Each structure stands twice: as C-alpha cells, then as structure tokens.
Amino acid sequence: MATKSKRQKAILRRNLFLAAVSVVLIAAIGLTVFIITSIMGGDDKNNNSDNQSGSQNQSVNNETEQSQEQTSSEPTPQKVMLGDFEGDATYERMLLVNVKNPLPEDHNYNENLMVFPSEYKWFSQDEVYRKLDKDMWPYLKAMMDACRAEIGEKEIGIISAWRDYSTQKILFDAQIEKWKNQGYSQSDAEKAAASRVAIPGTSEHHTGLAVDFNTTDQSFENTKAFKWLKENAEDYGFIMRYAKDKMDITGGIIYEPWHWRFVGINAAKEINAMGYCLEEYLQEKN
Ligand SMILES: [Zn+2]
C-alpha cells in the first residue's frame, strides 16, 4: 500500500509540474505575440491616426498595407487570345501626357523599353527609332499581324514609335526654323510649330505606348489600314487618340488618323462606346 501511494504522489507531482510548465509556456507565447504585434503596429487605429509621427517600422508597415490594398482591388484578369499571345482584357496603361500634363525633362524616358523587329517598320530604320514599351508590344504585334493577314503584309507599318525628350526637341526646333524661314516672328513660329509638333515633354510618344502608322498625312484616313484599325484596334487595346472634334480637349492637337495609343482592351472599348477621348475618360473615372 505504501509503495502505491508513493507512486500516486509521484504521478501527482509530475502532473503538477507539467501543468506549471504549460502555464509558463502559454504565458511566454502570449507575451511574444503581444510584443511582435506591438512592434509591427498591427493595430489599425494606430496606423490611421498617427501617420506623421509614426516610427520607421510603422511607415514601412503602412506601405505594405497600401500595396496589399492595391493588389486586392485589382480586377480579376480576363484572358483573351490575340493570335498566339494570351492577353488580359483588364490590363490598363493610362499615363496621360499632353500640354497640361507634361513629363519633366529629367523623367526616365528609357524606362521599360524594347527594340521591336524591323519588319514592323514602314521603312527600315535604326534601332533608336524602333523602341516601344515592352509590356504593350505583344498587343501591338498581335494587332499588326492580324491586320496584315487580312489586308496585306505591306499595308501597315510603324513610322514613329517612342521618342525621348531630346529627339522631340530636335523635331520641335526644326519646325520653328521652318516657320521662321517663311517670315514668321519667333513667337508666331513657336505657336505654329506647337500645333504640328508636340512641345518637348508633352508628346505621347514619350510614353512608348503610342505609334504612328504609314504616314503623318490626313490621306491615311483613306487607306485600308485605317479602315481596319477603326473596326478592330479596340480589340487589341488601342484607340485613335486625336479625333476631329476633340481638339479643344486634347490640347489643340489636330486630327491625326495615323496616331494610335494603347490603353488596354476593356478601356479602349469603353472609351469608344462613350465617344470620349482619353482626357474625358480619365476625368470621368477620377
Ligand atoms: Zn504620333
């Protein structure tokens, strides 16, 4: 009997010891979680009410939260086959560049570019004139391939793609010279130049998301390429950027049937259905 009760006592002591250890462990885990949460600023109220005086840890955490919000509000991709390229109809590129929204001279004009194959050029040109945004290119390539398959290989080609600030300045200065040679004063020549060539920093070609096809002549309107683009370009995410009746909104840019801009497939269809130009569309969206 004595040995049995000794054993029972031993078992009881062991159980008490295990219980005590468990309590200490749980307390320790609880404390650790509390400390980590405090350091990470897990309390939303803290983040919202104290953005300015927040510690470095907090501001890092705020950025993480913001990017998570952006990710979660992104639309679900809508896959669409464009030839053998799988596009996403929800993909958008909305950078607005015009007279009222110029890019600064020190903007990174070389960002996200690639050199596209020379066979897509209207005529052969150096690599420096064959640069475009590399994420937009598969959409443009698919559009040109489809267009060429339907109307003919030689019916459409890119004459103008991405341009940096200094190239635009050369074009603009040449226009001013042209008008001055015709007897215009400096300021009149500048005005005349600005209605034909975008002032450096204000050209949509700086974005790498716009192209000119075939010729910068209004006669482009009468080509098979133009007719095809009017019917099909939105399916690839492109809009004709400068319409006849939008001059006062786009910053005085004349009707340019040759100038096409990538915005994204769903966006292009919406813009066309509304009869808007990009400026009007963005104003309504914001
Ligand atoms: Zn253009």
Image (cartoon, grey):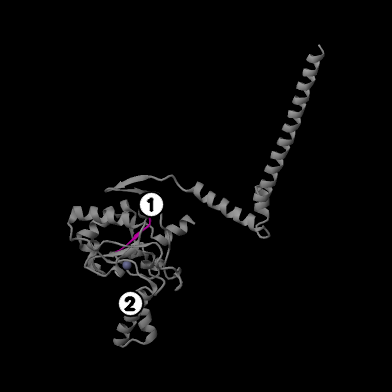
> Marks 1 and 2, Cα distance to the nearest angstrom?
34 Å
Q: Are marks 1 and 2 in contact (CB under 8 Å)?
A: no
- Earlier along the polypeptide chain: callout 1 or callout 2? 2
Amino acid type shown at disc 1: Glu
Q: Quadrant of residue 203?
A: bottom left
Q: Quadrant of ligand 1?
A: bottom left
Query: What residue would you read off at disc 2?
Result: 171
Q: Position of residue 75 (x, y in %)?
A: 45, 47
Amino acid type shown at disc 2: Leu
Q: Give the foreground label among 1 and 2.
A: 2
Up-down: is 166 above or below 30? Answer: below
Counting the numbered discs, the total is: 2
Q: Point out the stretch of residues depicted in magenta.
A: 259-266
Q: Position of residue 215 (x, y in %)?
A: 24, 68
Up-down: is 205 above or below 282? Answer: below
- Would you say 99 lies left or right of 119 here? right
Query: What residue would you read off at disc 1?
Result: 270
